Amino acid sequence: MRRVLEFAKSESLLVLTVVLFATAFVLAPGRAVQAARIGAGVFLGVLPIIVAVFAALGLFNVWIDKKAVARRLGEGSGIGTIVIASLFGTILVGPVYVVFPLLKAVREHGARWAIVGAVLTAWAVKIPMVPLEIGFLGLRFSLSRSILVAVSAIPLGLLLEYVMRIRTGEASRPGPD
């Protein structure tokens, strides 16, 4: 029973999805089957991308030296590195199932939380998408939003790092967790 509860806690999204589908099959079987078909189609559509991302992350883990990443992006890195990370975040495009595993791998190699937070915050800008945003929402809005997001990436990254240290009990000692 304890293992079941531990599994349910660690895989809560999966458990919730199964419960929702089971409920849907009871309440509206036809719609549940339709939802399952749509979900399967989406999954099969993104499966090649996910496989490629995981393969690339495997190569990253083998080819990229953890000590080099920790030295350049870890606790010893300064504010300039966070600025570069946030600039990188603005040009980074792609779905979350590509970006999140990439940032997880970088973090596991020793990058500090401020780097991850700055990249994710700045990722909301997506410079390649700005022309499309301008077309729909206007130049003034697009530039204002992009500048505000890019400028906030650095303090938010640093704040995230501070919060993560407190949360993990590392407020008094530096270093990746």
Image (cartoon, helix red, strand yellow):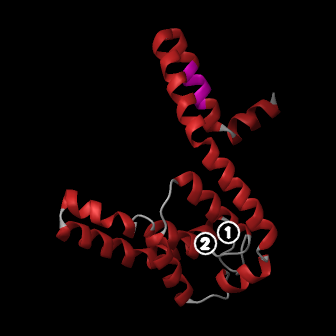
- Disc 1 residue type? Arg
Figure quadrant of the N terminus:
top right
Q: Is residue 125 visible?
A: no
The answer to whether mark 1 and mark 2 are in CB contact below 8 A is: yes
Residue 99 part of the magenta segment: no
Amino acid residing under circle 2:
Trp
Of residues 152 and 1, the one nearer the viewer is 152
Residue placed most toward the observer, 26 or 31? 31
Q: Is residue 69 above or below residue 138?
A: below
* Residue 58 visible to the viewer: yes
Residue, disc 2: 113
The magenta stretch spans which residues?
A: 16-21
Task: Bin the neighbour count of mark 2 within 10 Å (Cα to Cα): few under 14, some 14-19, many 20 and up.
Answer: many
| Near-viewer residue (134 or 25) | 134
In this view, 25 is above or below 51 = above
Query: Does 7 sit above or below residue 102?
Result: above
At label 1, counting other C-alpha atoms closer than 10 Å, the crowd grade (few under 14, some 14-19, many 20 or more) is many
- Residue 107, disc: 1
Direction from residue 100 to residue 136 in the image, left or right: left
